[in-house]
Amino acid sequence: MKLKAYFIAMACCAVLASCGKDDDGEGGGGTGTGTQVEDMTFTATIESVTDGPTIAWAADDAISVLDEAGNHKFTTTGSGATATFSGRADANAESFVALYPFQSGISLNGGKVSVSVSAEQTAVAGGFSGTNYAVAYAANDDAKTLNFKNVPAYLKITLSAADKVSSVTVAAKNGEQLAGEVDVTVADEITITEGSKASSTVTLVGDALDGTFYIQVLPQTLSGGYTLTMLNDEDLSYTQEVTSSVALSSSQAYDLGSFSGMEWVEAVNPNPTTVPSFNLIKASFEEADFNIVSEPGFEDYPLLALNDRTNWRIHTSALTTEAHEGSVAITVANPDPGVWFDLAMQAIALRANTDYVYSVWGKTGTPNVYTGVQSYSPNGGDENLRHEIHGPSTWPINADWSNQTLEFTSGPTVFYADVFCGIWGDEGAFFTVDDISLTPRGYDKKSMDATTASVLGTMSNTTFSTITDLGKAVMWKGLDGKLKVALSDVTIKGTHYDNAIAITDAEDVNGPISITNFVKEGGALTPIMVAGEGEISIVPNSVFTLNGKTYMHYFAKAADGADADTWTAASAGFLVSEDDGLTWTKGTGTWSGAGCFVEASVCEKDGMLYMVGAKAGRAVKGNVFANIYVARTSASGDFTDPTAWEYFDGLAWQSGDESVCNINTCCIAVGCTSEPAIVYNSKFDRFMMIYRSNTHGGLVFRDADAVDGFWSGEKIITDDDVIGGKSFAPSVLEVSADGELVMAAPQL
């Protein structure tokens, strides 16, 4: 969009650019013919704003003075409407163009400078916040005078403290740009061209605003007028419509009016916006046989190439439609004598000193086939055990499908294993396998499968505080029965916040959900918790209510990584709210930022709290050592203290110190995991661990009859493309009597 050009009287045909000669901010160094960079002074005036704020020079102000020799930094020690600026420039230049404030990286090569007007401005009584951009031209004569012209226009408004106004928003009815970053070209006139972060609204914020205030805007003609909306500390609103054309000119103030004793109404946006990257998902489940192996029949993505979205590390195998059950199996043909080919391998969690039963369906054209479980110990050597079914003694050659089983006992220090299938090459050799199973011996409990998953809808926002960007969001049902949302890395009304709390009026998780207001103090959006020393943000993981209080598990991010899947944490812990999520205080203690419960979720069952946790960051595809950890404590004690918890070390519960959880002893589940959520599903009498898998590219779950029990392999709930993109772990809002889950799943 090309904005209207605003004329400022200048005789200069030179223009500013973001390329060309540029100095170091200290003076010249030009190389043009006849240049002579030397000490110079300019007398600079600043244009007054008609019926507007007082604009004057201040000591230490700096300007850019541009000539063909470069960009020169001039400063002043004076103040007032006129000041003397000193620096170094080309004494032989025919003319000069100047810009306030000083900007590096600009020159006289025919281009643009960048000007930014914020979409949200803090109220300053009798003045304005932000930078006042101004430009000037001077001929190289004895006068050496720069008459600066202001670029912005100004909106004037007068308010009374009795109305407790907390924000004033002006919105262009036809969408003209009032704020954002724009490019400005200076010649005989100023031409403004739309840049980035364009906004057709501008908002003034403060606390019980009293007096006259000014709002900077980009000079613009509002062809359809504007809408003026004010909010007060009680989240009430006042709206005024102006439908005629309004000209907002540089260095001029447009008077919005004087307001007092307005008729306030409930603040509801007549044009609700949609909260970006947020979905509500309903998933259904059915009873199924238990299996530690993920994708035991290779059926998750039968139309995709192997190795694309699977937990199997598949090498030379291919899908075949000649399956034992379902639509596909995997097979390999190896004609190379004496050469070993792997069909597939999959990392699994294995318990020490435990009896297991391994089962596989297969067919082969050679006796030289092997399948089974290769377990590993942190001590290595002879403690790494291979439990296998060997072709020569068990597999019938060139026969139909045959089921083979193997019972074995894991070693005393085992912590994970590979399920494997492979073949030695001979002429005509092949091996086809399907429906692989691994279960603890005697385990007779049923597991679960997902049957359907659908997107119920998104979340709307009926406030005037539009959310334009959103990171993680955690939803829960408050003590008042209404849904609330903890937001992190969120942009609201053009301003970025590390975190915030949004309130809805929805009680039914299956119905429409709309944000009706945000938690504020004195009319200003308040954070959940401010990051401390060594922290860059407080990030919510999960929220739940218990014993009349609200608890939030969080981690304090220490640093971002190279991509969205990597970061480090300073600590993790609980925040506690005694007023239903309005204000928060930190709990008794914290967990280590390098520990096992940086990302965590909590659920309650029979008076006990169970926590599932993971280390900082998201495990990427192929990281077989990524682990999930569990802890438990009484729901009646101070569970915000890490020493109140017992931690499962892979064999038993130990109290007091999360360090007992480590990959070499505690293996609950391994593979591509991130930000797990835990919930108990009473319909199936199973705990469910839900997270997004970078391997599968979607939301998955594992289930167990106890958090320290045997966890199933991964099973898919829904794919990224169904819900519109990658997601964080969901917040489970409801588990129905028939075992259905309603989840809020914000996208990455």
Image (cartoon, rainbow, N blue to C red):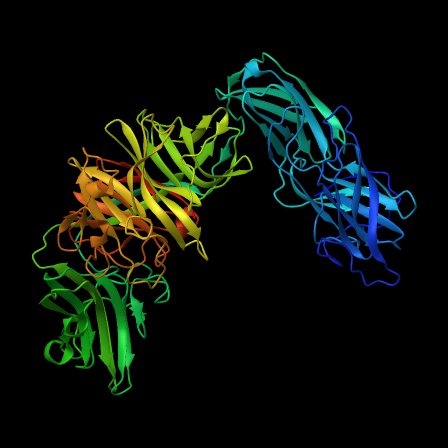
Q: In this view, does 99 lie above or below 338?
A: above
Residue 123 showing in the rendered view: yes
Q: Which residue is drawn at 37% across and 50% down?
A: 569
Residue 245 showing in the rendered view: no
Q: Quadrant of residue 572?
A: top left
Viewport quadrant of the N terminus: top right
Could you say which is closer to the camera, residue 605 or residue 93?
93
Could you say which is closer to the camera, residue 518 or residue 363?
518
Could you say which is closer to the camera, residue 336 or residue 432?
336
Q: In which quarter of the image is residue 669?
A: bottom left
Which residue of the protein is positioned furthest toward the right in this rendering? 142
The x and y percentages for residue 720 are: 40, 51
Could you say which is closer to the camera, residue 512 or residue 46?
46
The x and y percentages for residue 687 are: 20, 45
Q: Does residue 93 appear to the left or right of 684 in the view shown?
A: right
- Count of labels in the image: 0
Q: Quadrant of residue 733?
A: top left
Which residue of the protein is positioned furthest toward the left in this rendering? 442
The x and y percentages for residue 91 are: 87, 53
Q: Does residue 510 appear to the left or right of 95 in the view shown?
A: left
Which residue of the protein is positioned furthest toward the top in this rendering? 261
The x and y percentages for residue 722 are: 40, 49
Q: Which residue is drawn at 67% across and 32% down?
A: 216
Q: Does residue 182 appear to the left or right of 161 in the view shown?
A: right
